[in-house]
Amino acid sequence: MAIQKHDNLINGQWVAGAHYAPNINPSNIADVIGDYTQADAAQLDAAVKAAQAALPAWSTGNIQARADALDKIGTEILARREELGTLLAREEGKTLPEGIGEVSRAGNIFKFFAGECLRLSGEIVPSVRSGVSVEITREPVGVIGLITPWNFPIAIPAWKTAPALAYGNCVVLKPADLVPGCAWALAEIISRSGIPAGVFNLVMGRGSVIGDPLVNHPGINAISFTGSQGVGNRIAQQCAANLKKVQLEMGGKNPQVILDDADLAQAVELSVQSAFFSTGQRCTAASRLIVTDGIYPKFLGAMKQRMAGLKIGDALGAGIDIGPVSSRAQLEQDLSYVEIGKAEGGLLVAGGERLKLSAEGFYLAPALLTDTTAAMRINREEVFGPVASIIRVKGYEEALREANNTPYGLSSGIATTSLKYASHFKRHSQAGMVMVNLPTAGVDYHVPFGGRKGSSYGSREQGRYAHEFFTTVKTTYIAS
């Protein structure tokens, strides 16, 4: 069977780039999902200009038509959740249930923002001057460049694209080069939704080729980026130099605190889910397990037992708990951090080795290291894989200090049956999202998402708070 070729969507037309790159299944590297074209700077420029041309009509057009289009997109995504979830599992390595869950989330996001099209609001306030009234309204920012990562190949493009369109902006989406399939499928659905040509554009390709041209293009009014801290810092500097609005989500080194009074079974399960599910490839994953003395021996034993029972294999397989790492490069990075942790004095007590299964893929046994300290690289740097370390502490006060002892601040969790400690942790955890007796990974689509410190920059994503980034405020004075 011939491998299907997939092109970029520019001004409502499917356009081939200079060449194509294969999309490889990390569960079985012999499985090529499809060939996806690679944009160059000229195609990127054409996409931006198409968005500029479409902006005047779209930004001031009928809001019911806008809502209907977004609702249609969400409806089709949800109707095809199993098909698209299978595609996601094949190209990224999430298990099939996780893939279907992510697709469902993407569909619900479009449904939510379809409603937001009709909930646009403003204010009318009195002026301090007689005979003058004041209107405060929100308007679209303009043409938005969206740069999305590989770990959530449909949910993150959805939660950036849907609010951008809902508030009247036009979009140029550049998905991660590693996982173009879900973004292409989303673009194909959008292309049939009734949204005019040029309002949404897809440009696939390497960041090294089209990333900087997108960020620095004079026709781009704002950039929303999710990815590494290093790239995010560079984008922030480029946007500041060009006075562009910027929104950055840049990962985390999230803590999961386990107190002596925690329910042991619950604490183990939420720790395993936080650290290892989705192969640990979530920015909200808890890679630092901070455990107090009293529960430490029982917790460690129960964790090792639970990890031994995890089923690792092809993401499409029945009953699989954890699929492959997303790429060879990511697998090598994960393995290198296991060695770094051991070299620093950590003790590898479970997993950490590459697995050989029936089909060649990027499989890693989830790794757990003990005897680690906050100063070690394994506890300072984001690994972004199924690698967790335990920091042993004396009590709650030390646990809180260690939880906050990180340059990141995205998500944090605590396992406890004490209302006193739970309430104190909610208030004093230096993170944008706090989980009490829940995994650190796993968030709702209708509420704000984002962190503090090195994890995030700019206004929050998702929910009604998305309007802070995707709109700008206008104040109008009217003489009566």
Image (tube, rainbow, N blue to C red):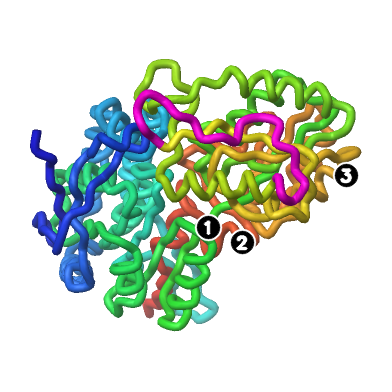
Most prominent secondary structure in the magenta stretch? Answer: loop
- Looking at the image, which residue is at 50% across and 37% down? 444
Q: Picture quarter containing residue 30?
A: top left
Mark 3: secondary structure: helix
Q: What amino acid type is highlighted by mark number 3?
A: Glu
Q: From the viewer's perspective, is 7 left or right of 357?
A: left
Would residue 106 be seen by someone viewing this image from the given angle?
no
Q: Which residues lie in the magenta part?
A: 342-361
For label 2, the residue is 454
Q: Mark 3 and mark 2 in contact (Cβ < 8 Å)?
A: no
First of labels 2, 3 by sequence position: 3
Mark 2: secondary structure: loop
Residue 139 percent location from the top left of the image = 35, 66
Q: What amino acid type is highlighted by mark number 2?
A: Gly
Residue 304 percent location from the top left of the image = 69, 23
Front in this rendered view, residue 385 or 48: 385
Q: Give the alpha-carbon distance from disc 2 to disc 3, as whole Å.
A: 23 Å
Q: Picture quarter containing residue 145?
A: bottom left
- Looking at the image, which residue is at 47% across and 60% down? 468
Q: Mark 2 and mark 1 in contact (Cβ < 8 Å)?
A: yes
Up the image or down, 294 lies above or below 111; here it is above
First of labels 3, 1 by sequence position: 1
Q: From the viewer's perspective, is 21 left or right of 388?
A: left
Mark 1: secondary structure: loop
For label 3, the residue is 397
Q: What amino acid type is highlighted by mark number 1?
A: Met
For label 1, the residue is 250
